[in-house]
Image (cartoon, rainbow, N blue to C red):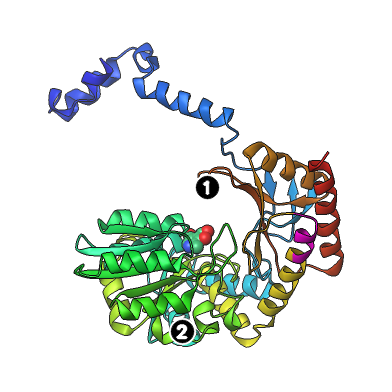
C-alpha cells in the first residue's frame, strides 16, 4: 500500500491526494518501509566495527581548550592552526560587518547577495595570492565542487592523488570526467598514467598541497614539470597550507611555483579561523568559474559576519606571517619527540601529525587515554583513511605554550607505555 501511495500516476488530482492521505489511519504510517531494514543493518554493522560516527559532546570546540563531557582538554583536533577563530580583531570585524550589513546576504552573489566588503575581500585575497582575481565560496567543499564541475567534463581526464580530499573526489564525480588516480605522492606512477592518457582531449591534475590526514606535502615541482610537459591544467588545494606555509600564502608560493599553477584553491575555514572557500587565478579562469560553478551560482552568498572576519584574518596574516613559522618549528619538535617514543608519524612535514596505530579499537582506546591525560585528539578511522591505518590526527596550533608542549609529550609518553603493556 505504501508503495502504491508513493506512485504519482495513481493520483493525478492533488486535492484528492491530500484528502486521501488525511483519511488514512495512523497505523499505515507505522509500517516500516523496506529500506529501513537495510539502514538499520548498516548502522549495526558500523557500530560492531567501531565505525559508527557520532557528534562528540564538545563545548567551545574551536577554542585552544575545549570542554568535553564537562572536562577541560587541550584541543589538538581543530584546524584553527593559528588560533585566530577566537581572536578579538576577527570578532570585532564580524560585529562591525553585521551592524553595517545585517546577518544574512539573502540571495546568491549573482542576484543581490553582494556587498562592498565582499568585493574588497576578493581584491585583497587576489593581491595576497599574487593572482589577477579571486572568488569566494560558502565552503572549501563548495569551491572544489565548482572547480571540477566547471573545468572538467566528459572529454577531460583528471589526474588525482589517491589521498586527495573527499571534496575533490566528489567534484570529479559530479563533472563526469574520467578520473585517473595515481598512488599517493608517487611521481613515477603519475608519469606512467599521464603518458598513457597523453592523447586525451583535455587534461587536468588536482592535488592537495598538504594531505589532510597525513600532514605530508605534495611533490609540487615534479608535478608542475609533468603538467607542463603533458599540457595539463594544474589545480592545487591549499586548504591546510594557507596561513602556515609561504608567509601564509601556501606551498606554491613557498616553492616559487605561483605562475606554474593554474588555479589556487584555499579556505578561510582552517588557518584563517573563519569560514568559506576561495579560488584564485587568471581573470578569465575566475570569470569562467563565476559563470559555470553551480555551487556558486545556485547558493546563497556568505554572511557579512563571515566576510568581515575573513578580511580581518587575511590582513593579520598578510601583516605578520610569523605565526606560521612558529607553528612549523613547534610541529617539528613534537614529531621528533613522538618518533623517539616509537610512534609512527608517517611522512608528516607540517602542523598535521598522524600517530598511526593500525586498528580502529586501538585508535579509540588511545583517544580515550589522551582524554584522561587532558588532551583531545581526533581518532580517524576508515573510510576516511585506508583500512588498517586508523590513527590519532594531531593538529598543532601556533598558540600552544611551552607548558602545553610538555603536557602533550608527557601524555604520549604515558600512552606508549600503556599500549605496550
Ligand atoms: C584538503 C581539503 N580541501 C577542502 C576541504 C573543505 O574545506 P571546508 O571545510 O571549508 O569545506 C577540506 C576540509 O577539511 C580539506 O581538508
Q: In this view of the protein, which residue sits in the foreground, 337 or 275? A: 337
Give the quadrant of residue 351: bottom right
Q: Nearer the viewer, mark 1 or mark 2?
A: 1
202 in the magenta segment: no
Residue 269 x %, y %: 55, 65
Residue drawn 70% across the image and 67% down it:
397
Residue 268 x %, y %: 53, 69
Query: How many numbered discs?
Result: 2
Quadrant of the image containing the N terminus: top left
Q: Which mark is residue 257?
A: 2
Q: As drawn, is 275 to the left or to the right of 285?
A: right
Q: Secondary structure at mark 2?
A: loop
Q: Is residue 139 visible?
A: no
Q: Which residues are magenta?
A: 336-342
Give the quadrant of residue 319: bottom right
Q: Residues within 10 Å of mark 1 (few under 14, many from 20)?
A: few
Q: Residues within 10 Å of mark 2 (few under 14, many from 20)?
A: few
Residue indicated by mark 1: 386
Q: As drawn, is 12 to the left or to the right of 178?
A: left
Residue drawn 53% across the image and 77% down it:
251
Residue 237 x %, y %: 46, 69
Find out if the beta carbon at label 2 lies less than 8 Å from the nearest ligand 1 atom. Answer: no
Q: In this view of the protein, which residue sits in the foreground, 100 or 310? A: 310
Residue 204 x %, y %: 31, 69
Residue drawn 71% across the image and 60% down it:
63
Q: In this view of the protein, which residue sits in the foreground, 105 or 140? A: 140
Q: Is residue 11 visible?
A: yes
Find out if the beta carbon at label 1 lies less than 8 Å from the nearest ligand 1 atom. Answer: no
Residue drawn 70% across the image and 73% down it:
327
Distance of mark 1 from mark 2, alpha carbons?
30 Å
Amino acid at each position: 500500500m505504501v508503495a502504491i501511495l508513493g506512485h504519482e500516476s495513481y493520483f493525478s488530482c492533488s486535492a484528492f491526494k491530500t484528502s486521501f492521505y488525511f483519511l488514512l489511519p495512523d497505523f499505515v504510517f507505522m509500517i516500516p518501509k523496506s529500506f529501513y531494514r537495510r539502514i538499520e543493518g548498516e548502522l549495526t554493522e558500523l557500530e560492531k566495527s567501531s565505525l559508527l560516527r557520532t557528534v562528540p559532546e564538545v563545548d567551545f570546540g574551536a577554542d585552544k581548550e575545549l570542554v568535553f563531557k564537562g572536562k577541560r582538554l587541550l584541543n589538538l583536533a581543530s584546524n584553527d592552526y593559528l588560533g585566530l577563530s577566537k581572536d578579538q580583531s576577527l570578532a570585532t570585524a564580524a560585529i562591525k560587518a553585521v551592524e553595517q550589513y545585517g546577518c544574512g546576504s539573502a540571495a546568491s552573489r549573482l542576484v543581490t547577495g553582494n556587498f562592498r566588503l565582499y568585493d574588497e575581500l576578493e581584491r585583497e585575497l587576489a593581491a595576497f595570492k599574487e593572482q589577477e582575481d579571486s572568488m569566494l565560496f560558502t565552503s572549501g567543499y563548495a569551491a572544489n565542487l565548482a572547480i571540477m564541475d566547471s573545468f572538467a567534463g566528459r572529454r577531460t581526464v583528471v589526474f588525482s592523488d589517491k589521498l586527495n580530499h573527499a571534496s575533490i573526489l566528489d567534484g570529479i564525480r559530479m563533472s563526469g570526467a574520467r578520473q585517473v588516480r595515481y598512488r599517493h605522492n608517487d611521481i613515477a606512477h603519475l608519469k606512467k598514467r599521464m603518458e598513457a592518457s597523453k592523447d586525451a582531449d583535455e587534461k587536468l591534475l588536482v592535488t592537495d598541497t598538504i594531505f589532510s590526514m597525513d600532514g605530508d606535502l605534495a611533490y609540487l615541482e615534479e608535478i608542475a614539470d609533468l603538467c607542463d610537459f603533458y599540457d595539463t591544467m594544474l589545480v592545487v588545494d591549499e586548504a591546510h597550507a594557507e596561513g602556515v606555509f609561504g608567509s601564509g600564502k601556501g606551498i606554491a608560493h613557498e616553492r616559487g611555483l605561483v605562475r606554474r599553477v593554474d588555479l589556487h584553491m584555499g579556505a578561510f575555514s582552517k588557518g584563517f579561523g573563519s569560514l568559506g572557500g576561495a579560488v584564485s587565478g587568471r581573470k578569465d579562469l575566475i570569470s569562467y568559474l563565476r559563470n559555470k560553478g553551480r555551487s556558486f551560482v545556485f547558493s546563497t552568498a556568505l554572511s557579512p559576519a563571515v566576510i568581515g572576519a575573513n578580511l580581518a584574518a587575511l590582513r593579520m596574516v598578510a601583516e605578520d606571517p610569523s605565526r606560521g613559522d612558529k607553528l612549523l618549528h613547534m610541529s617539528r619538535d613534537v614529531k621528533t619527540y613522538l618518533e623517539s617514543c616509537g610512534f609512527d608519524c608517517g611522512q608528516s612535514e607540517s602542523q598535521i601529525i598522524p600517530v598511526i596505530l593500525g586498528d580502529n579499537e586501538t585508535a579509540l582506546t588511545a583517544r580515550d587515554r589522551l582524554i584522561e591525560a587532558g588532551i583531545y585528539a581526533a581518532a580517524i578511522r576508515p573510510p576516511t583513511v585506508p583500512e588498517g591505518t586508523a590513527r590519532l590526527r594531531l593538529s598543532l596550533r601556533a598558540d600552544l605554550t611551552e607548558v602545553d608542549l610538555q603536557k602533550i609529550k608527557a601524555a604520549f609518553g604515558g600512552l606508549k607505555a600503556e599500549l605496550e603493556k
